[in-house]
Image (cartoon, coloured by chain):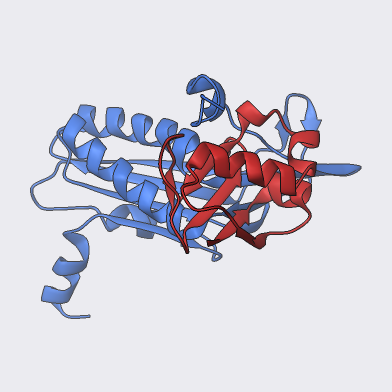
Chain colours: A red, B blue
Amino acid sequence: MKVNVLFFGATADSAGLREAEMALDENTNAGQALERIFSAFPGLIKNHQPKSLLFAVNQEYAKGDEMIREGDELAVFTAVSGG
Amino acid sequence: MGAAEEREKQNSDFFELTGDVLDVGEIARRVVLAECGATVTLDGYVRRFTKGRETEHLVYEAYRPMALSEMKKLIEKAREKFEIAFVGIVHRLGKLEIGETSVVISVGAPHRRAAFEACEWLIRELKRTVPIWKKEVFADGEVWIEGDSAETKGGSNLSDI
């Protein structure tokens, strides 16, 4: 299944792009999807502690066991720093 | 704008992202209600020195749709926690010079104490959960600032990874 992956700020710099389409296996959960993203964009784990990154699915902070669906919008970003 | 429309505009929360210069007074007046006695407004602006390093300017970026939905959730939670009427949050994006306002949070309430407490709570939570990032640009380089939200949460929101 196809999903859209978004990066912002520091993770966009590390991934080398801001948006990518990825193919994931059926029955992939959020934790597994994030591992796939780390493999596809090695700059992420080169430049960031994996545990420090935040992960959103369809514009909500994700839970690791949440199932990913075709067409979902995934986003990987660093701890937020607005204000 | 007619009187009815003016009232309609005031009688609601608002949360916005904009590339435009923020008019703090205008934003603050938008949460004023006849039933209320105080509005507390935070005017957050760009600081020249952070930890001894001199900032040239800042660049703010947001995950726009998620930032707006997180701002909406914060306002809903604030109303559950505090005796407040209405909240307005406006965050500016793009390039900001020293001293320019980056965020305005206005809280209108019948009494000031709840407005102060809610405003402090809202900015603290905004800096922890709303997906907006700032890049500090110096004379000799630039860096994306990482907040402390991951620490606060004890690591990633996927802590089992």
Q: Position of residue B89 (x, y in %)?
A: 37, 50
**Side of B3 relative to B103 (left or right):** left
Q: Is residue B135 left or right of residue B159?
A: right
Considering depth in this image, is B80 or B160 the residue closer to the camera?
B160
Q: Residue at the spot x=46%, y=48% of the render?
A: A27
**Residue visible at 14% across and 67% down?**
B7
Residue A5: quarter of image: bottom right
Q: Quadrant of residue A69?
A: bottom left
Q: Residue at x 29, y 27 (%)?
A: B117
Q: From this viewpoint, which residue is outermost toward the bottom? A: B1
Q: Is residue B82 visible?
A: no
Q: Is residue A19 visible?
A: yes
Considering only vertical position in the picture, is A36 above or below A63? below
- Report the residue that reaches farthest toward the right: B140
Q: Is residue B75 left or right of residue B155?
A: left
Q: Is residue B50 above or below residue B97?
A: above
Q: Check the image and name the residue furthest to the left.
A: B35
- Residue A72 coordinates in the image, percent (x, y): 47, 59
**At 22% across and 80% down in the image, what residue appears?**
B1
Compared to B112, does B26 lie above or below? below
Residue B161 on image: x %, y %: 57, 28
* Total numbered labels placed on residues in the image: 0
Q: Position of residue A3 (x, y in %)?
A: 54, 60
User: In this orientation, which residue lies closer to the viewer: A30 or B30?
Assistant: A30
Image side of residue A61 versus residue B4, left or right: right
Location of residue B150 with respect to B91 vertically, above or below: above
Which residue is farthest front? A26
